[in-house]
Image (tube, rainbow, N blue to C red):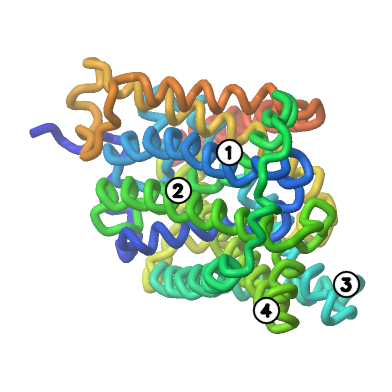
């Protein structure tokens, strides 16, 4: 029997508390954010009655990528997810770029989502819309989430689980009630969308389905991660695909002016459930963004911890609290950066990086599936507990889907992604020199 690979170091000090459904909650929270509440009208405006079918098709495409993630994740039991896989398959530099992009986009996304939360609540409490009350609210939420994360992975998981139920329940009620008020005439396929319309909507949906790539990141805090992570990846896509498809059907079939609505689910719910329904969906949107914030904090800090644990950042970023068994410094740094971005108002510019970041992570992970299958890695990495069928077909198709996303990326997204990768390369050189210098000093002492 081969020894565990160097990419999954033992004794990290983290507490293994997460089960398969806890990891599924992490995934659902990251995928189901504000898009499911706001974008059904956008899909309808572009492809009309074809929108539910396109949601289902993109869900299937996302499943192909998730299956590739599931196989490679079943080889590892450490913290880091795609960063670990890339490090094992393609070396330190490529892995650092993946890890850096994962961390940076989590921090920027957290800043963006927390501003969305403040704006949503500002509709009911105008004081939160601007000035010091908005800054105080954002700061309080950020500090609270950081404190929960520091106290322990179990506490973070419990809060995430509650928020997952809280965001799914209004959507389930919306579908369960709304299905009886559907007007079949609104679901008629009136015209065939053009290739450009299909491509545009498909790209929007691929990003709407994104977020599940963070599920493997906290694997170092999971029980039996080599089985729990693949389960969570697949279940997340199944749950999200079902919810998003049914929500699109009900919204399209109950709201005649769906394409023009700015709050499509709340407007549709108001038609068949009155003001109570609209309030319920608004509450669901608030809980959704809050849960997304929790997930960003958890996965973002673990990305930073993984870089330090593997020796690609100074060890101070990987310090684990002796009582709480959480990566405190990584949590504090991630929270501080996110708060600074949120208060600066530059988060929307930085969010452009997410397009290229997701592409990089998808391609690197799916390529790692194929590379780690080769004979040269036998004995160097754990054998998979889950194997994708049909040989290279599914990972190859997943790579093709990920690369196709690049064709739809805007020029500013490409520029932001390239600049971020160059920044990552500079940080890698600085980190390597810093670590080597520290090691030399220790040797002299």
User: Distance between the Cα atoms at labels 4 and 2?
Assistant: 29 Å
Q: Looking at the image, can residue 122 be seen?
A: yes
Badge 4 vs badge 2, beta-carbon distance below 8 Å = no
Q: Label 1 belongs to which residue?
A: 100
User: Distance between the Cα atoms at labels 4 and 3?
Assistant: 28 Å
Comparing marks 4 and 2, which lies closer to the viewer? 4
User: Distance between the Cα atoms at labels 1 and 3?
Assistant: 32 Å
Comparing marks 1 and 4, which lies closer to the viewer? 4
Q: Residue at x 81, y 57 (%)?
A: 257
> Does residue 305 appear to the left or right of 286 in the view shown?
left
The label on residue 237 is 2
Q: Residue at x 42, y 50 (%)?
A: 238
Mark nearer the N terminus (2 vs 3): 3
Q: Nearer the viewer, residue 240 or 163?
A: 240
Q: Label 3 belongs to which residue?
A: 129
Q: Find residue 378 and report its horizontal and vertical position in percent.
A: 19, 22
Mark nearer the N terminus (1 vs 3): 1
């Amino acid at each position: 029997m081969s020894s565990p690979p160097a990419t999954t170091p033992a004794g990290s000090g983290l507490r293994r508390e997460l089960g398969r459904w806890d990891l599924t909650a992490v995934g659902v929270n990251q995928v189901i954010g504000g898009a499911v509440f706001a974008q059904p009208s956008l899909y309808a405006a572009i492809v009309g009655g074809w929108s539910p079918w396109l949601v289902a098709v993109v869900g299937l495409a996302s499943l192909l990528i998730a299956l590739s993630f599931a196989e490679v994740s079943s080889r590892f039991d450490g913290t880091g997810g795609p960063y670990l896989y890339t490090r094992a398959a393609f070396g330190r530099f490529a892995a650092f770029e993946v890890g850096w992009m994962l961390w940076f986009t989590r921090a920027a996304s957290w800043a963006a989502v927390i501003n969305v939360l403040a704006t949503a609540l500002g509709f009911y409490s105008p004081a939160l819309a601007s000035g010091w009350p908005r800054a105080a609210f954002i700061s309080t939420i950020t500090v609270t989430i950081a404190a929960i994360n520091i106290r322990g992975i179990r506490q973070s998981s419990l809060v995430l689980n509650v928020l997952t139920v809280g965001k799914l329940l209004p959507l389930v009620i919306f579908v369960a009630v709304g299905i009886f008020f559907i007007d079949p005439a609104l679901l008629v396929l009136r015209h065939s969308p053009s290739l450009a319309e299909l491509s545009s909507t498909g790209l929007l949906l691929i990003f709407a389905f994104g977020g599940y790539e963070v599920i493997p990141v906290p694997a170092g805090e999971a029980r039996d991660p080599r089985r729990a992570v693949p389960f969570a990846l697949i279940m997340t896509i199944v749950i999200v695909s079902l919810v998003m498809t049914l929500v699109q059907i009900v919204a399209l079939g109950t709201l005649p002016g769906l394409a023009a609505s700015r709050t499509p689910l709340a407007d549709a719910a108001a038609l068949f459930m009155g003001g109570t329904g609209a309030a319920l969906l608004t509450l669901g949107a608030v809980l959704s963004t809050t849960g997304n914030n929790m997930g960003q904090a958890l996965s973002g800090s673990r990305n930073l911890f993984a870089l330090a644990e593997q020796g690609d950042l100074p060890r101070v970023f990987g310090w684990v609290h002796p009582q709480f068994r959480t990566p405190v410094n990584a949590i504090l740094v991630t929270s501080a950066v996110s708060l600074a971005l949120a208060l600066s108002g530059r988060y929307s510019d930085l969010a452009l990086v997410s397009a290229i970041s997701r592409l990089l992570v998808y391609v690197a992970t799916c390529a790692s599936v194929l590379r780690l299958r080769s004979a040269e890695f036998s004995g160097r990495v754990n054998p998979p507990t889950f194997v994708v069928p049909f040989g290279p077909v599914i990972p190859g198709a997943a790579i093709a889907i990920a690369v196709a996303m690049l064709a739809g990326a805007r020029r500013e997204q490409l520029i932001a992604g390239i600049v971020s990768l160059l920044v990552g390369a500079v940080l890698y050189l600085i980190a390597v020199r810093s670590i080597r210098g520290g090691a030399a000093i220790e040797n002299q002492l």
